[in-house]
Every structure is written in structure tokens, then in C-alpha cells.
Image: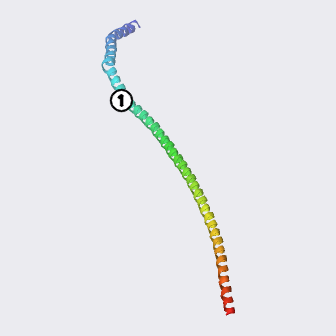
Amino acid sequence: MDATLHALGGILLNAVPTFVIVFLLYFYLKYVFFRPLSRVLEARYEATEGARKRAEEILARAAGMTSEYEEAMRSARAEVYLAQEQLHQKLEAQRAADLEVAHQKAESLIQEAKEQLKRELAESKEKLQQESEVLANQIADTLLSRSTA
């Protein structure tokens, strides 16, 4: 058994340089190969994922700006419709007022015409009365002058 342990110790002693070489190779590869490789992979990830995240942020901002623009458009349309409605009401009120003025003017003209007709009728009646009296007198004179003749 002593020989086996001695042989095992010799094997382990012969394996120490291999172990040291593997250990040194591990650190060498870690610093020379894997660290730059991980930096490149990380940079590539940042480039792709960063670009993706920036694109998502830009899309989110664009969606926000679109919704703000649509809200501004709705608000502007509402203001325009309100202004149109107010103008329509104002014009309708103006038209009603103008119509009322025209109606009153027409009523006034009708009243004046009625009064004028009444005056003319009265004048005509008076004139006819006078003319009828003159004619009656003339007829009476003519008849009387014929009767005496």
C-alpha cells in the first residue's frame, strides 16, 4: 500500500505542472480571448438591444405626439364648430331683427296707405256730394226752365 501511495504521489507530482499549465492557460484565455469576446458580444447586444429600445422609445413618443396632435385637431374642430354655431345664431338673430324691422315698416306703410285711402275716399265723397248738388241744381234749373217755357 505504501508503494501505491508513493506511486500516486508521483503521479500527482507529475500532474502539478500540467495543472499549473492548465490554470495559466485558463487565465490567459480568460484575459486574452474570453474578456474581449464578452466585450464584443456585450457591445453587439447593446447595439441591437439599445437600437431596439431607442426605436421603442421613439415609437412611444411618436404615438404620444400623434395622440396630442389628434386631440389638438379635435379641439380645433370643436372651436371651429362653436364659432360657426355662434355666427349662425348671430346671423339668425340679425335676420330675425331685419325681418321684424321690415314687418314694422310694411305695417307702417299699410297704415299710411289706409289713411291715405280714407282721406281720398272722404275727399271723393265730399267732391261727389258737391258735384251731385251742383248737378242736382243744374238738373233742377234745366227742368224748371223747360217747365216754364
Q: How is the image coloured?
A: rainbow
* Pick the front one: 124 or 89: 124
> What's the residue at 40%, 32% (across, down)?
54
> What's the residue at 41%, 34% (across, down)?
58
Query: Dividing the picture into quarters, in which one does residue 12 lie?
Result: top left
> What's the residue at 40%, 6% (across, down)?
2
Give the image location of residue 125, x and y in percent: 66, 74
Task: Tell me if residue 117 comes above or below residue 11 in the rendering.
Answer: below
Give the image location of residue 13, x and y in percent: 34, 8
Type of amino acid at the residue the image marks with label 1: Ala
Task: Tell me if residue 143 comes above or below residue 31 in the rendering.
Answer: below
> What's the residue at 52%, 45% (across, down)?
78
* Pick the front one: 102 or 149: 149
Q: For mark 1, does the 10 Å Cα neighbourhood hold few (<14), some (14 to 19), or many (20 or more) residues?
A: few
Image quarter of the N terminus:
top left
The secondary structure type at the circle numbered 1 is helix
Task: Tell me if residue 79 comes above or below residue 23 in the rendering.
Answer: below
* Pick the front one: 91 or 22: 91
Image quarter of the C terminus:
bottom right
Give the image location of residue 30, x and y in percent: 34, 18
Task: Tell me if residue 54 comes above or below residue 144 in the rendering.
Answer: above
In the displayed image of the protein, which residue is found farthest to the bottom? 149
Give the image location of residue 112, x and y in percent: 61, 63
* Pick the front one: 103 or 45: 103
Query: Dividing the picture into quarters, in which one does residue 121 lie?
Result: bottom right
How many numbered discs sit on the rendered protein?
1
In the picture of the structure, the residue carrying the numbered disc 1 is 47
